[in-house]
Image: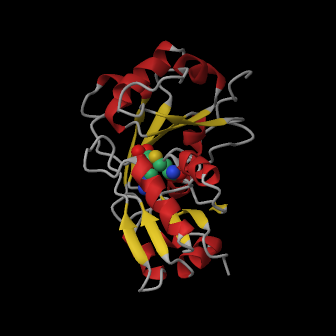
């Protein structure tokens, strides 16, 4: 049993409720407070005891009614200080985007015992659904998880598209839905071949999953191709040639990091 007054940062997985880990399930069953995000499948909340407090942190990016991050941190810490077992349930993996790192730091700074239970991140959910190996001995020696937008939806600071274009084999872009054409243009400008395949996966692992397979060129230049509502994950690289039913000769991995 988890100690009272502990915060558990739990990965809920990418959408399919079956993709929660057993450790995550156990944490939910023992929870006295569950603070959950917008991308968490609501079905998972049924695993928490009926009397557990459920708090919707509904963080829709850019919307003002969203609970500010500081407020989430405060609620999480207050409840734990009151001796309750707090589960902070986050979409995918808690430490891949989604500000899990900030919550971890806040809990530590407050002196609250905190544990992290990993989750299946969206990249893995989408890759499994499409049967794309993110790495492959013959086709992809490296993979990068990259953010497609900054905190306010703008071009992300600190992402070197040019370096990523030529030095990383498989690229997975999170939070890119609003900037897909611009991202494709930056990758092409950085030297990525225009005919590199791209998969856009919306609502990966859920019954309404949508998949679009196209080329970098189409994504960069056809506005309709890039028009897709979030949550979307973009996967690009030669590994896509190895997706389900598409086995062709693989390109050699890109050279040198
Ligand atoms: N911690 C999460 C990511 C949070 S950032 C994780 O590990 O998956 C939110 C972004 O994740 C979305 O903008 C989208 O790019 C991606 N994402 C999350 N769930 C998704 C899903 N079911 N299908 C497609 N993309 C998803």
Residue 145 spot, x, y in % from top left: 57, 38
Quarter of the picture holding the N terminus: bottom right
Residue 254 spot, x, y in % from top left: 68, 25
Quarter of the picture holding the C terminus: top right
> Total number of numbered labels?
0
Quadrant position of residue 117: bottom right
- Is 239 positioned to the left or the right of 156 in the image? right
Residue 89 makes an appearance in the image? no
Tell me which colouring the rendered structure shows. Answer: secondary structure
Residue 155 spot, x, y in % from top left: 40, 24
Position of 51 relative to 92 (above/below): below
Residue sitting nearer the eye, 188 or 176:
176
Position of 204 relative to 105 (above/below): below
- Tell me which residue sits at (74%, 21%) in the image: 256
- Tell me which residue sits at (69%, 29%) in the image: 252
The residue furthest bottom is 50
Residue sitting nearer the eye, 139 or 98:
98
- Is 246 positioned to the left or the right of 253 in the image? left
Residue 226 makes an appearance in the image? yes
Residue 44 spot, x, y in % from top left: 45, 74
- Tell me which residue sits at (26%, 44%) in the image: 63
Quadrant position of residue 38: bottom left
Position of 34 relative to 48 (above/below): above
- Tell me which residue sits at (49%, 21%) in the image: 187
- Is 1 positioned to the left or the right of 183 in the image? right
- Is 179 positioned to the left or the right of 102 in the image? left
């Amino acid at each position: 049993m988890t100690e009272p007054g502990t915060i558990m940062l739990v990965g809920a997985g990418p959408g399919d409720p079956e993709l929660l880990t057993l450790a995550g399930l156990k944490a939910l069953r023992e929870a006295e407070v569950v603070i959950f995000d917008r991308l968490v499948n609501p079905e998972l909340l049924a695993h928490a005891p009926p009397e557990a407090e459920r708090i919707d942190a509904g963080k829709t990016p850019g919307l003002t009614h969203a609970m500010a991050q500081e407020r989430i941190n405060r609620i999480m810490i207050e409840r734990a200080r009151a001796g309750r077992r707090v589960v902070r349930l986050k979409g995918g993996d808690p430490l891949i985007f989604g500000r899990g790192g900030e919550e971890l730091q806040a809990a530590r700074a407050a002196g609250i015992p905190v544990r992290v239970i990993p989750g299946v991140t969206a990249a893995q959910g989408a890759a499994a659904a499409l049967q794309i190996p993110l790495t492959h001995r013959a086709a992809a020696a490296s993979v990068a998880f990259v953010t497609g937008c900054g905190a306010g939806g703008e071009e992300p600071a600190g992402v070197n598209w040019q370096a990523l274009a030529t030095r990383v084999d498989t690229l997975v872009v999170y939070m890119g839905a609003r900037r897909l054409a611009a991202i494709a243009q930056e990758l092409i400008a950085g030297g990525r071949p225009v005919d590199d395949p791209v998969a856009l996966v919306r609502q990966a692992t859920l019954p309404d999953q949508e998949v679009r397979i196209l080329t970098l060129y189409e994504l960069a230049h056809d506005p309709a191709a890039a028009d897709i509502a979030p949550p979307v994950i973009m996967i690009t690289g030669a590994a896509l040639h190895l997706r389900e039913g598409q086995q062709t000769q693989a390109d050699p991995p890109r050279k040198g990091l």
